[in-house]
Amino acid sequence: MSNGKIYPLWPVLLGEFQNPDHQEIKKELIEFFKEYEVKNKISRTGTENYNLFESKYNLHQEKNSALTKILNFIANGFLSMAKNINKAELDRMENKNPKFDVKIKESWFIKYNNGGAVMPHDHGNCSMSCVYYVQVGENADLNNGSTYFLRPYNRGSSHKDLGGLRYVNGGASLFKAEEGKLLVWPSFIMHGSKPYNGDKNRIIISANAQISVMENGKPVRSV
C-alpha cells in the first residue's frame, strides 16, 4: 500500500527551554524563598501534596529582581510554545506580525523535603502550565525527583493487540529535573513529580498562563 497516507492526529507538544542566566540569579532566588517561608509559615495544603512547602498562588505579585527575571523567562517560554502549537492558525491571519499578551494567572514555588512528591493532577482555568527547576541535588535522576506526564488517551478504549498496543503501553513520560530547565505543556495533561531524596531541597517554580493575540491594545483571541 505504497500510495497510502498516515496522519499524526492531535500531537501533544511539550517545550523544554534552558535558562543561560540561571546560575547568576539562583542564590538570590533561594534567599528570597527562605525569607518568604519565614513570613508565610503555613504551606498551601492539597490532596496531591506530600512532605513539601508550597507558596500561595500569587508569587508573580511579589517584588524581587531575580524572580522578575525568571518570570520573564517563563513568559517567553509560554509564548514560544503558543506560537509553535498554533503556527497554522497564525499563518492564516492577515496580520503577519501580531502582538501577543502573556498573562500569568497563577504562580507559586514548591520546596520539596526528603521524600516530597506531588501526585497526578492537572491545572484548570488556563491554557498552559510549566515547571522551572531552581535547585536540584546532583543525585536527581528519572527515578528521583523527575517530573512525569501521563498519556491523555482513554486507556479503556484501547486493546492490547498490535492495533492498540502503542496506546496502552508507555503510559508516562519522565523528564529529569535539572537546574535552569523550564518545561511547558498544555494544562490538561495530568502530571506529577516522583518522590525526591537528596542532600539539597528540590525547589521549583510553577505557573499557569493564558496567551492572547492583541489588536489595538486589546486581546481579541486566545492562542
Image (cartoon, grey):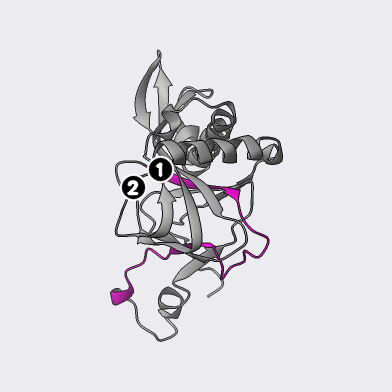
Badge 2 density bin: few <14, some 14–19, many ≥20, Cα 10 Å:
some
* Residue 77 x, y percent position in the rendering: 55, 39
Q: Quadrant of the C terminus?
A: top left
Q: As rendered, which of 36 and 99 lies closer to the eye?
A: 36
- Residue type at numbered disc 1: Ser
Image side of residue 47 versus residue 11, left or right = left
Report helix, strand or loop for mark 1: loop
Asked whether the residues under the numbered discs 1 and 2 touch, taking CB atoms below 8 Å apart as contact, a structural biologist would say yes
- Is 4 above or below relative to 55? below
Mark 1 and mark 2 lie on one chain; the one further toward the N terminus is: 2
In magenta stretch: residue 139: yes
As drawn, the label of residue 44 is 2
Magenta segment range? 127-156
* Residue 47 x, y percent position in the rendering: 29, 59
- Residue type at numbered disc 2: Arg
Q: As rendered, which of 7 and 25 lies closer to the eye?
A: 25
